[in-house]
Amino acid sequence: MHIVRLVGAILLAVAAVAVWFVLAPAKSASSPDFSSAISQALSDYDTNNANTESAPQQQVLNGWVAKDLLTVIARAQNAAVSPRSAPRDDRLPAEMLLAVLGVALIAATTPRMPSEPVGAAPIAPGPMVPPSSSSMYPM
């Protein structure tokens, strides 16, 4: 059983690595690039920051750049969950299947305790005899 478990574990590990690389989704050429929007927001911030003269103006400017960057994040998230732009990734379900197979392998190869024969009487322990005080403390 030990050899079966070892071989099964090695096969599952190799399969897990193979699944991760073989089932990797292809890079989508249509996925949008938001680096130019990020660069534009930060460039606008630098330009406007040079013209600020007080803390309230800087607070307003920081709010604007935060809004611009949050807009970029929202667009990137929408593009990531859009079924048209994101290729399907089947690696996690396949890895979970391999994990279930690993648990099944452990369950199938774990040694079982032998069951008692039907009708066999359990062995009763003998009577408990306290040690005598003379044998415990010789004089």
Image (cartoon, rainbow, N blue to C red):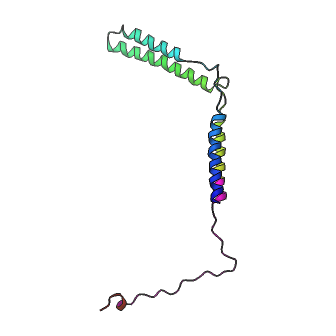
Q: Of 123 and 76, which appears nearest the observer?
A: 123
Q: Of 87 and 110, which appears nearest the observer?
A: 110
Image x and y of residue 105, in percent: 66, 54
For the C terminus, give its image quadrant: bottom left
- Helix, strand or loop: magenta stretch: loop
- Asked if residue 126 is positioned above or below residue 95 in the image, the reply reads below
Residue that sits furthest to the left in the current view: 139
Indicate the quadrant where residue 83 lies.
top right
Image x and y of residue 116, in percent: 66, 75
Q: How many marks?
A: 0
Task: Look at 53% across and 86% down and name the residue there.
Answer: 126
Task: Look at 44% across and 16% down and name the residue there.
Answer: 65
Task: Look at 64% across and 20% down and name the residue there.
Answer: 29
Image x and y of residue 117, in percent: 68, 76
In the rendered structure, the answer to whether residue 93 lies left or right of residue 56 reads right
The magenta segment is 105-133
- Asked if residue 33 is positioned above or below residue 90 in the image, the reply reads above
